[in-house]
Image (cartoon, rainbow, N blue to C red):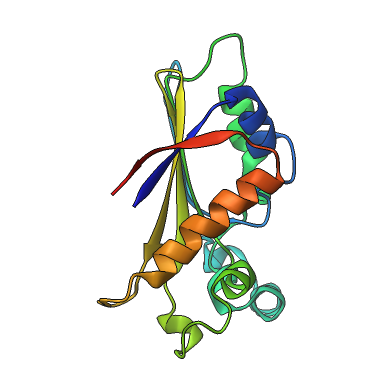
Amino acid sequence: MIVIEIIDIKNFMAHLLLKDTFDHFLLFEARAVTASEFLMKGGRRREWYDSDQWSQMCSERGEHDCMHMTWNEMKEIMFHFIKGKKSPQLLYVDLEASSRQREQILGGAFAVQDSELPSLRMQIRYENEHLTIVPAASYPSFSPDRSAGQMWEEALQEFLRRKKIVFHLLNNS
């Protein structure tokens, strides 16, 4: 497992909150602490939509992806909560790669059904003037094969480099 420390926090926050860099990732959870605390869950509530809306959304996005809000749909709310003269005491954002992103990263490396592929997540944490990202592969059932996690770690680092987000690795265990 690796921990990625972001060097230029201001640049990263612009990518996270103002640019479209992370827009296609699915939101698992986000939390911010300022003068109060704000918690945002990324699960999409099916009962909010009529059956036609839900069916159309799932046919466009796929069954898994339609169950979650995208970061694009939620980031403005978070931005408005934390903006101000002071940085938040804590900002935690847990994002998951969409099915399409996961397919691009893992390719044909796994001969299993889509539902058996691991979810690829990044846990972004800003606290005490430090910003870290922990990439994680969450398997739906036990698997001794951890290659998906390694592929995700490498893909995420390459993604950050392409976006000119400067970082270094804190540890590699």
In the rendered view, would you say 54 is above or below 108? Answer: above
In the rendered view, would you say 76 is above or below 138? Answer: above
In the figure, is residue 165 to the left or right of 39?
right
How many labels, in total? 0
Can residue 27 be seen at all in this image of the molecule? yes
User: Residue at 47% of width from left, 50% of height from top?
Assistant: 122
- List x then y, in percent, for residue 139: 35, 71
The picture quadrant where one finds residue 59 is bottom right
Can residue 96 be seen at all in this image of the molecule? no
In the rendered view, would you say 135 is above or below 3? Answer: below
Q: Nearer the viewer, residue 170 or 130?
A: 170
Name of the residue lying farthest toward the top: 85
User: Residue at 49% of width from left, 35% of height from top?
Assistant: 168
- List x then y, in percent, for residue 144: 25, 76
Q: Nearer the viewer, residue 1 or 12?
A: 1
In the figure, is residue 166 to the left or right of 172?
right
Q: Nearer the viewer, residue 53 or 155?
A: 155
- List x then y, in percent, for residue 112: 44, 89
- List x then y, in percent, for residue 125: 43, 35
